[in-house]
Image (cartoon, rainbow, N blue to C red):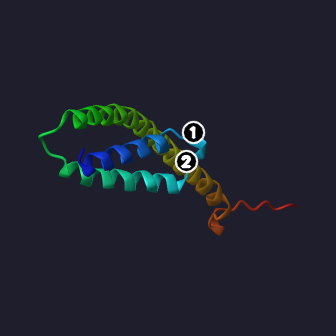
């Protein structure tokens, strides 16, 4: 079996392991590791060209199956990240609106005179 196919399988398995971590355990370093693995695998995929032996075809089928699992999880992760970003923007807008009241221009204050 060619080294590029073997390396591609190993990277794909590593990606599967990382993406199967629970949501609360995913940190920035895991996201960076996922990005690095995807880039490395992309480079290897360009080097993999036919003809394939029967063993390489079997490994290729395993890679495709693992990739389907990885793709589903990456889509879920992307949705979670989009939701987090949306919530952060809402928080930022909400806190800005509260801060805006205390920073009103002096001409807009209401002065109550007691007689």
User: Position of 70 compared to 54: left or right?
Assistant: right
| Helix, strand or loop status at disc 1 | loop
- For the view shown, which residue lies furthest in the right direction? 115
Instruction: Classify residue 64 by image quadrant.
Output: top left
How many tags in the picture? Answer: 2
At horizontal 19% and vertical 51% (from top left) the residue drawn is: 46
Q: Give the x, y percent position of residue 18.
A: 48, 45
- Of 60 and 42, nearer the camera is 60
User: Position of 100 compared to 40: left or right?
Assistant: right
Q: Give the x, y percent position of residue 11.
A: 37, 48
Q: Give the x, y percent position of residue 16.
A: 43, 40
Q: Which mark is residue 22?
A: 1
At horizontal 43% and vertical 36% (from top left) the residue drawn is: 73
- Of 71 and 43, nearer the camera is 43
At horizontal 31% and vertical 37% (from top left) the residue drawn is: 63
Instruction: Classify residue 108 by image quadrant.
Output: bottom right
| Helix, strand or loop status at disc 2 | loop
User: Position of 28 compared to 75: left or right?
Assistant: right
At horizontal 54% and vertical 41% (from top left) the residue drawn is: 21
Task: Check disc 2 and report the residue beneath it.
Answer: 26
Q: Which mark is residue 10?
A: none
Q: Give the x, y percent position of residue 82.
A: 46, 44
**What crowding class fits label 1: few (fewer than 14 Cα within 10 Å), some (14-19), or many (20 or more)?**
few
Find out whether the residues at labels 2 and 1 contact each other: C-beta distance under 8 Å.
yes
């Amino acid at each position: 079996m060619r080294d590029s196919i073997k390396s591609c399988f190993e990277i794909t398995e590593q990606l599967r392991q990382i993406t199967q971590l629970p949501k609360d355990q995913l940190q920035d370093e895991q996201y960076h590791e996922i990005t690095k693995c995807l880039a490395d695998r992309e480079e290897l995929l360009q080097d993999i060209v036919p003809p394939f032996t029967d063993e390489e075809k079997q490994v290729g089928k395993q890679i495709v199956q693992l990739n389907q699992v990885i793709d589903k999880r990456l889509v879920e992760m992307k949705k979670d990240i989009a939701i987090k970003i949306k919530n952060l923007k809402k928080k930022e807008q909400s806190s800005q609106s509260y801060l805006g009241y205390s920073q009103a221009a002096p001409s807009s204050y209401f002065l109550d005179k007691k007689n």
